[in-house]
Image (cartoon, rainbow, N blue to C red):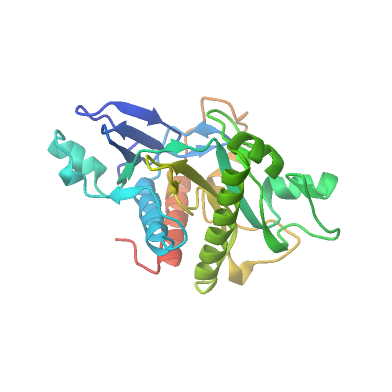
Amino acid sequence: MSTVQTTALGAYPLFRRGKVRDVYDLGDRLLMVATDRISAFDVVMNEGIPDKGALLTSISLYWFEHLGHVIPNHLLSTDVSTLPGLTDDERQVLAGRSMIVRKTRPLPVECVVRGYLAGSGWKEYQSSQTVCGIALPAGYRESAQLETPIFTPATKAEEGHDENISFERSAEILGQDVAERVRDVSIALYNAAAKDVAGKGLILADTKFEFGIDESGEIILIDEALTPDSSRYWLASSYAEGTSQMNFDKQVLRDWLETTTWDKTPPPPTLPAEVVQATRAKYIEAYERITGRQWQ
């Protein structure tokens, strides 16, 4: 089964290449292409995960459709056949993994919402009983549900890890009004999504959103939305407070890498076929549980 690791379009210049997405400049719009690249410990693996880009795109499309009442988003179309200058091969590569989106001025803050205590939030809580400077009650255990979801912003990092910051620092970066707006919208998006997946046997532990300001000055939701790459989804039936949970993402990959002697710097080790297939299966299960649709 083949993968799409990189894309190269003759008709359009590359606008930006991230760990997963290739973004092209269409002039008045952008073309976002989700490849099958996968990273772990901030290193992109040599092997891709078949269908990963299409799965992530399909999950984002589900959420853009179901959360449009909370805030507008940047999606214009998924129909790459409308783009002039593409070859038949390019159209075939782009199909199912591409979004034509509005251009915006991205806000330089990741908008993270946590409903449960996990990851870097759990580590900070253990040392200071805070998460991003927010004081929490004593007695929480790992993976515990918080009394109310909390907004814990982070600065975006082109390389390496994002850095958690306080809300006050986010207000200094964005301005008080914008910071309050994205905080309130982020929590509303999280609550709506968490309620949606709760009926499907999933727990949305935390997630991160990105926002941009469009040409009319409106704040809109951009990038991906509530995919397993930007969110922690847990299976409700196996949830147990006091221990780490199995995520619907690349945890299979990370767990395997931890069994090797790899020092987490490039180049990464070659991934066994069974790890690639098990990781793909997790993404497919996430898609099917979140959307209620069968992956074709």
Q: Quadrant of residue 178?
A: top right
- Can you give x and y, in whole percent of width and height, for residue 11 in the image? 19, 28
Question: In this image, 291 relative to 193: left or right?
Answer: left
- Can you give x and y, in whole percent of width and height, for residue 214 in the image? 40, 41
Which of 284/207 is in front?
A: 207
Q: Quadrant of residue 83?
A: top left
Question: In this image, 76 relative to 19: left or right?
Answer: left
Task: Establish if 259 lies above or below 251.
Answer: above
Task: Establish if 45 lies above or below 288.
Answer: above
- Can you give x and y, in whole percent of width and height, for residue 254 in the image? 57, 43
Furthest toward the right, the residue is: 138
- Can you give x and y, in whole percent of width and height, for residue 215 in the image? 37, 39
Which of 26/174 is in front?
A: 174
Task: Establish if 230 lies above or below 198.
Answer: above
Q: Residue at left 70%, top 66%?
A: 240
Q: Residue at left 43%, top 42%?
A: 217
For residue 126, say whether it is visible.
Answer: yes
Total numbered labels placed on residues in the image: 0
For residue 50, say whether it is visible.
Answer: no
Quadrant in which the C terminus is drawn: bottom left
